[in-house]
Amino acid sequence: MSGVAVDRELGAPLHHQIYLVLADGIAAGRYAAGERLPTEEQLGKLFSVSRITVRRAMASLQNAGLIERGAGRRTVVKPLGKPLKVPMASVISNIAAYGAQTVAKVIEFGYGPAPAFLRDRLWEGDRPVQRAVRIRSQDGQPVMHLTSYVPQTLGGTFSRAVLDRIPMFQLLTRAGAHISAGEQIVSATLADPVVASRLEIKVGAALIDVRTMMLDQRGRAVEYVEMLAPPERLSLRFELGAEQFVSLSPKSRRRSP
């Protein structure tokens, strides 16, 4: 949360900018389900705004079903939806298409603690993870904002300069990560001031929000990536196998007497 500012010159009300920043934090897992958010007073100091402005932002979060508020207790984050199980062929084909049709630029790269929701999934527990932020562009136009987290064991095998040239998926494979499964959440969100600036769109513009967890054959997370993209600049293609429809058939829903 530190370093994120709101600005009257951005063209969106301050309370809406705060809503976008907090909503993105919830979607990204920076605030886990059941975790308490900072108080109104703390948020007011963080964003340098009045408590009335903070209250309007919190009301928007509550109306969106992202938080719960009640008398006598602080605001807590509500649980998000469960991940969608998707065929790895579909995930990998999309990744390959991104790499072939777009050019990446690394704008943030470093190591630090894993977000709370990833600490129990990554190879090394409490050890630092590599976090990288990239912008992928096509014909000079930004099309997606990517934030990736990988275990230090894997991330330490390549540098920022290499990531600028070679897609993450290829680097992980080269480092010995044998990806065999994945989980994905696809939803929609609104552009906060930071992402809007990087994608060259308006604050509050609609975005496709795709969160993907890549797993190896032992079920360990080898990469978690958050992708944000304007819908008019990106399309996703998923392949569905017959086995995915078994649970939906009338026979599969029958129960023995």
Image: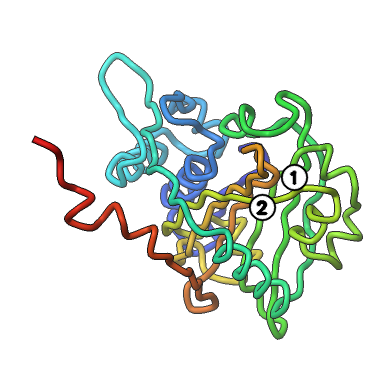
Where residue 48 appears, x then y in whole percent?
A: 55, 38
Display coloring:
rainbow
Query: How crowded is the residue under tag 2: few (<14 C-alpha within 10 Å), some, or many (20+)?
Result: many
Q: Is residue 71 left or right of residue 172?
A: left
Q: In this rendering, is residue 219 above or below 86?
A: above
Where residue 127 appears, x then y in whole percent?
A: 77, 26
| Residue depicted at x 47% and y 50% | 20
Q: Is residue 148 left or right of residue 152?
A: left
Q: In the orientation shown, which residue stands out farthest toward the bottom?
A: 139
| The label number, if any, that marks residue 117 in the structure image | none
Type of amino acid under label 2: Thr
Where residue 53 appears, x then y in whole percent?
A: 40, 41
Query: Which residue occupies the foreground of this view, 199 or 169?
Result: 169
Mark 2 sits on what residue? 147
Mark 1 sits on what residue? 131
| Residue depicted at x 42% and y 47% | 15
Type of amino acid under label 1: Arg
Q: In this rendering, is residue 101 above or below 84?
A: below
Count of numbered tags: 2
Query: Which residue occupies the foreground of this view, 14 or 245?
Result: 245
Please report contact status of discs 2 and 1: CB closer than 8 Å, yes or no.
yes
Q: Is residue 166 left or right of residue 45?
A: right
Callout 2: SS: strand
Callout 1: SS: strand
Measured Cα–Cα span from mark 2 to mark 1: 7 Å
Where residue 57 appears, x then y in whole percent?
A: 38, 43
| Residue depicted at x 66% and y 64% | 198
User: Which image quarter is the C terminus in?
Assistant: top left
Residue 119 placement: quadrant? top right
Sequence-first disc among 2 and 1: 1
